[in-house]
Structures are given as structure tokens and as C-alpha cells.
Amino acid sequence: MKVKYKNKHTVFPYLKWLIIGDNIFKIISALFASTILLLLGLMVYELIKGSWLSIQTFGLDFILGTKWDPAISKVFGALPLILGTAVTSAIALLIGVPISLGVGLALSEYIPKRYGFVISFLVELLAAVPSVIYGLWGMFVLIPFLRDYIYSHIRALFGFIPIFSGPIYGGGVLTAGIVLAIMIIPTVSAVMRDLFMIVPNSQREAIIALGATKLETVKTVVSYTRSGVIGAIILGLGRAIGETMAVTMVIGNRFQVWPSSLFDAWYTMSAIIANELLEATYDLYVSALMNVALALLFITLVINILSRLIVWRTLRLVRGIAKE
Amino acid sequence: MRKPNYYKLRLIKDRVMFLLVYLSLALALIPLFSILYEVVQRGIPAINLDFFIKPTPTVGEKGGGVANAIQGTLITIGLASVIGIPVGLMSGIFLSEYSEHKLSTIIRFFNDVLSGVPSIIIGVFAYALIVRSIGFSVIAAAFALSIIMIPIVTRTVEEALKLIPMNIREAAIALGVPRWKTVVAIVLRGARKAVVTGILLSIARIAGESAPVLVTMGFWRWWFAGLDRPAANLALNIFIFAMSPFENWIVLAWGSALILILLVLGINIAVRIFIRGRY
């Protein structure tokens, strides 16, 4: 027997409401998710607005200027800060990347799986330690240790090279680089571990079958994910550049164009914001600090977008091949 | 002529690499153990009853505690969670359940980007947006901390919901359950442990943030005095105390560090055991 309905809503009286409810939920969740885009956009807008006065006053001289004098001439140039950030981050990468590579390889290739998770967990704990505690530890434990046992020896051995000469205060450029290295190791090594883990076993088996040693196998694994490893390093760079409190506590906070040696005090972009934003008493001063923040945001955005794209692409590429 | 045999050399290289890998592992983990050891060893002498019930001592005053900082931290984190958790939760739902939507790839990408923005920049953003209009306040700090929280919650919620098998959703939809109810009552419920885990980890993260707190509230040594005023903060106190020349404050810094590290690592360890117990 065939029954004719006038419309579908008489059979499913709630269908209309169900569909409306679904759409409302979808729109609400989409709106919440869009706040992420909104926040990023607003952040860029607010920082540009805040630093407008400084951009108008100094223009390009802000990036190239080497004078930071809030008290008398009210001239602000951020080049030494940019150099300070660049050099400390470079030292952090120089020390941190080889160690991270070792840790990543240990976790994916060397340590048996049943112990691996404990070590992975410890490395992740290292990432969870708040940056201010790294700073506290750096000030009261690492600085005395480096000053008394390491730096004096370095200076005795390599003192003829200018960067390793000069007075040793304990805190300074090299100390900041070391603390940053310790702080980026967990992030970089975790990404590297994930990259190495997804390399298909057929790759390892193939080269082992050719009689390769472990080292040669590992080389294949690393070269297989080469671009991803570079992405992981850039990711670490992004973290090092933005790190604030730990650096502020160990770098010595002295504004100078170029330190006399690696043991000398210096300043970074993030550290000057943390130290001076609350003391900035007039608009141009605040605006100059905002301008530093804007430059820092710009650098980290570029670095982050670049590294995410590289890591994403590698993960997808390698996973795609593994599936075939 | 026979080719020279490189076998020995290859084996030596292999052993050297083996040693280097374990050496780097040791170098990476020594700081963790050193931090834990020093914080416990130097923090314990600071812990006594006064530490938990008295506010920040004035300069030169003996004793004192961090009770006001614990109170201020809890209030600030609470307010940040009230903003951050709903946004993160709904965004995570959107990314996982409506992943076919055009926006979702873009939002996923920029969510990752937002999680990489340095916390000091987020602090400066809150300073520009809120501090300049209503002044240094708990609201400004909570706003900054919630922006740090959102990407973490979003990410973990998305990953948690994606672990729920598709056929469970299909079964619910086949029974005529509307999609939103499927998400809330079935998918979210099935993933609730992982969701709670993500939220707890994000709370652990913002509890340790000091840079954004510094530029949005500054140092405040009194008790909580309203949401439009600053409040004391444990992580920031460590910075201020450590940089100060006063012996008593430095002792309090180590005590605060002990409390903070117990809280942060405690949450991390508890969460790990929690998850492992499940699978």
C-alpha cells in the first residue's frame, strides 16, 4: 500500500529542527574556531598600531640604529638587540641541534622500545619545566658552575681567540646560549624522534641487507627525512628567539652594540621588553618597545610558518610513501 | 691488487656514533636531574607554615610567605581557563568534526602558528589591548594566559576526538541522532579523559608562565584586590625574588620554584599515568 505524504516533515516532524540545530552547532563551533584567526589578526594590528609612533619617528633607523637612550636624547635603535637575539639563538642551535639529533636518534633507533618510553617521558618533562625555573637554576647553579669550572679553562686554552678572552662574569652571551640550548632540546628532539619513527622499516631492512652497520642505517634514516630535520631545527630557532625570562636572568642585560667576548653581558629583544615595558614613562618609549615586539613577532611568524610547512610536508610525504 | 678492507674502520665509526648518541642523551637529561635536585634541596628549607599562610614580606622583613601569590595564581588561572577552555574545546570540535570545512585547514595551520608565538609577545598584545584601557589587572593577565592556552587545548581536543572511530559516529547518525548531539553526547564523552588531559596540561603550562604576567600585572606584593587590579603570581615572584639582592626573597624564590615544579611536573606525571592506565 502506498501512502502519499504532503511533505517529509509530517513523517519526521523534528527533521527540520534537527537540521537547524546541526547548522547552529556548526556555526557556533566555526565561530569559536575563527577566534584563533581573529586573535592573530588583532595581535598584528595592535602591535602595528602601538608601534606606529616609533615607525613614524625613526623609520628604518629603528632597525639600523645602535643607540638606545630613553633618558636624554630619546633615540631608539634596535640593531644591538636584534644582533643579541641572533647570536644567542645561533649559539643555542650550535649546541642544541647536535644533542637533539642524538636524543632523537637514541629514542627512535638506539634505545629498545620498552625503555624508550621512560626516556621520552623524561625529555618531555624537560619541556614542561617553566622558563623562569630554568632562569633561577641558570642564575644560581649553572652560572657558578660554568664560571668556576668551564669558562676559566676555555679562556686558558683558547684565550688567544678574541671571542674567548676578556673578563668572566658568569652570566653573559655564552651562558644565555647554553640555557637556550637546554630549553630547545626537548622540542627539537621530540620532532626529530617523530620524523625518524615514521621512516618505513623497509628502508632500514634494505640497507641492513646490504651489510650496513648501524651508523650507516641511521644515516639513511636521517637523509630520508632531511627536510623535516631542517624544519625541526627552524622550529627550535623560533623557540630560542622568543624565549624571555630565562635569558633575561642570565644574559646580564647590558645594551651594547657588540660584546667584547662571549663571556660579556648583552641584551636581547625579548629581554628588553620584559625589563623596560613597565618602566616606560612616555609614549615614544612605549611605542619603541612595541616596535621591538612587532619585529620579534614578524621574525617568529616567518620562522614558524616556514618550519610548520616543511615539517607538515615531510610528514605527509613520508607517510604517503609508507602507505603505498 | 686487493682493495683495502674498510670493515674495521666502519665498525669503529659505528661504535663512536653509538657513544655519541648516548652521550647526547646524558647531556640532555643532566639539566633535568640537576634542576630537580637543586629545587628540592634549596626549596625545602623555605617551606614552613608561614610560607603557606603569610603574604610577601616587605624588604628587610624576616619570614613571610607566598600565600598571596598562590591565591593570585589560582584566581588568574581560573579566569584564564574560563575564557580559554570553551574556545579551545569548541575549536577542537570544529577541527575534528567538521574537518571537511574549508576553514578548518587554515585554522589548524594558524593554530600551530599561534602556539609558536612567544609568550612575551602575547603579553605585549594584552598590554596594548587591555592594560592601556583599564590598567594593570588580573583581567589583562588572564586574557594573555588564555591566548597561550587556546592553541594547546584546541590541538589536544582535536587529536582526542579523532581517535574515536568513525563507525561510532555513523552508528549514532543511523539511529537518527542529530550530528551535534552525536558530537556532544557520544564523541566528546568517549574522548573525555583525553580532553581533560589536554586541559590539565594547558593549565600546567600557563601556571609556569611569567613573561606575559610581568607585562600585564607587574609585581604585586599584596593580596588579591579585585579583577581590575593586579594580583600576585607565583611564577613572576620567582623572577622578581631571584633578581632581588635580598637573602630572604631568594630563599622564597626557591620555595616558590619547588611549589611550582611540583604542580607542573605533578600534573604532567599524573596525566601520563592516567593515559597509560587507559590503554
Image (spheres, coloured by chain):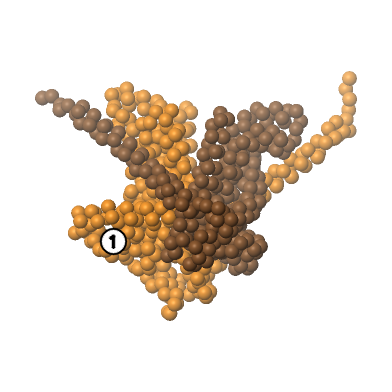
Q: Tell me: residue B65, above or below residue A117.
A: below
Task: Determine whether the residue tagged by mark 1 lies in a helix, strand or loop.
Answer: loop
Q: Tell me: residue B192, above or below residue B137.
A: above
Q: Tell me: residue A96, above or below residue A18.
A: below
- Is the N terminus of chain A in the top left, top right, bottom left or bottom right quadrant? top right
**Side of A176 relative to A275 (left or right):** left
| Residue lying furthest bottom | A72
**Side of A239 relative to A29 (left or right):** left
Residue A3 horizontal/vertical position (percent)? 89, 25
Q: Residue at x 61, y 39 (%)?
A: B195
Q: Which residue is mark 1?
A: A168
Is residue A44 visible from the viewing direction of this image? no
Visual hue assigned to chain A: orange
Pointer 1 chain: A
Q: Residue at x 13, y 24 (%)?
A: B2
Visual hue assigned to chain B: brown
- In the image, what residue type sits under mark 1? Ile
Is residue B268 visible from the viewing direction of this image? yes
Residue A91 horizontal/vertical position (percent)? 34, 53
